Image (cartoon, helix red, strand yellow):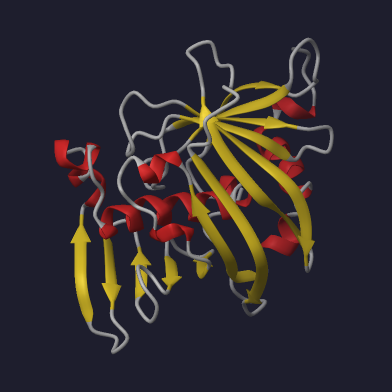
């Protein structure tokens, strides 16, 4: 590929973020609250349907932290951080907790059945990633390993290596971009779910909320060894009904920005 602005990692990230509102607008945000529901075969296969209930999910931008209202039942609250997940009852008393969830979910039992804490870890890191991408790429350690951004002969894409400190599906992930540089497909291997799993995650219906844009419909289907997305079944679906944004003071910054 000829040397262009896309040979510069910083410019690539800036252009992708610009398609969803730009660095300046994202950098002002402290927290994004989503009213959403999620479900799909991936959860049914682990005997979990509690996510299908519509609930508010609070996503922090300054740290890997997500709060789920009414999880796993009305009045309870689920909390995700990389090192610990826990559930508080309506009296703010912790009734269940787990540490080192990622390692524990490699056990055979978790390949057959998920506890509410397992679901909380998986949904927590996943929704945190989905909500913050592509702004997340500005944090330290993200590396572009392959691109085709000229859109010649094949779709535009950027392949990115995630740093170890970011809990995500896997280290190598691929993002397909439309003509506006918005992500419309996201390929990854959901290692927490199964070591053999390969997924193609589609983002649809970008809507503007304040000064940023977010896709409000998402679904995930299997991905073949040839990289092609299957037509079905839908392993995961996420539907966002409402978004509210809270802002930080102008003196604060998020992470280590490029």
Q: Is residue 108 above or below residue 57?
A: above
Query: Where residue 160 sits in the image (x, y, percent)?
Result: 54, 31
Between residue 100 and residue 6, name the one nearer to us.
100
Q: Is residue 242 visible?
A: yes
> Horizontally, is 198 left or right of 4 in the view?
left
Between residue 238 and residue 244, name the one nearer to us.
238
Q: Is residue 107 above or below residue 25?
A: above
Query: Where residue 141 sits in the image (x, y, percent)?
Result: 47, 41
Quadrant of the image containing the N terminus: top right
Between residue 95 and residue 166, name the one nearer to us.
95
Q: Is residue 231 above or below residue 56?
A: above
Q: How many marks?
A: 0
Query: Where residue 208 sits in the image (x, y, percent)?
Result: 79, 60
The residue positioned 65% from the left and 76% from the top of the image is: 247
| Residue located farthest toward the bottom when viewing the structure as drawn | 91
> Horizontally, is 56 left or right of 12 in the view?
left
> Horizontally, is 18 left or right of 107 in the view?
right
Between residue 32 and residue 194, name the one nearer to us.
194
Query: Where residue 242 sits in the image (x, y, percent)?
Result: 67, 68
The residue positioned 34% from the left and 58% from the top of the image is: 120
The residue positioned 35% from the left and 77% from the top of the image is: 76
| Residue located farthest toward the left when viewing the structure as drawn | 108
Q: Is residue 134 visible?
A: no
């Amino acid at each position: 590929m000829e040397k262009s602005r896309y040979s510069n990692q910083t410019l690539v990230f800036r252009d992708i973020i610009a398609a969803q509102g730009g660095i300046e607008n994202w950098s002002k945000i402290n927290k994004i609250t989503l009213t959403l529901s999620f479900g799909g075969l991936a959860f049914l296969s682990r005997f979990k349907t509690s996510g299908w209930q519509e609930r508010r999910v609070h996503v922090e931008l300054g740290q890997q932290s997500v709060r789920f209202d009414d999880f796993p039942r009305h009045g309870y609250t689920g909390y995700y951080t990389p090192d610990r997940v826990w559930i508080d009852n309506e009296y703010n008393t912790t009734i269940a907790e787990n540490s080192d969830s990622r390692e524990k979910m490699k056990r055979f039992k978790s390949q057959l059945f998920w506890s509410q804490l397992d679901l909380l870890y998986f949904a927590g890191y996943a929704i945190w990633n989905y909500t913050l991408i592509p702004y997340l790429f500005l944090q330290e350690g993200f590396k572009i390993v392959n691109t085709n951004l000229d859109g010649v002969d094949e779709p535009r894409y950027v392949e990115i290596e995630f740093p170890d400190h970011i809990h995500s599906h896997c280290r190598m992930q691929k993002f397909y971009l439309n003509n506006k540089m918005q992500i419309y497909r996201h390929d990854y291997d959901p290692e927490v779910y199964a070591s053999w799993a390969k997924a193609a995650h589609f983002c649809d219906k970008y809507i503007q909320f304040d000064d940023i844009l977010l896709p409000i419909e998402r679904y995930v289907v299997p991905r073949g060894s040839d990289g092609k997305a299957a037509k079905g079944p839908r392993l995961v679906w996420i539907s966002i009904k409402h978004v509210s944004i809270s802002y930080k003071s102008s003196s604060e910054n998020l992470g280590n920005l490029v």
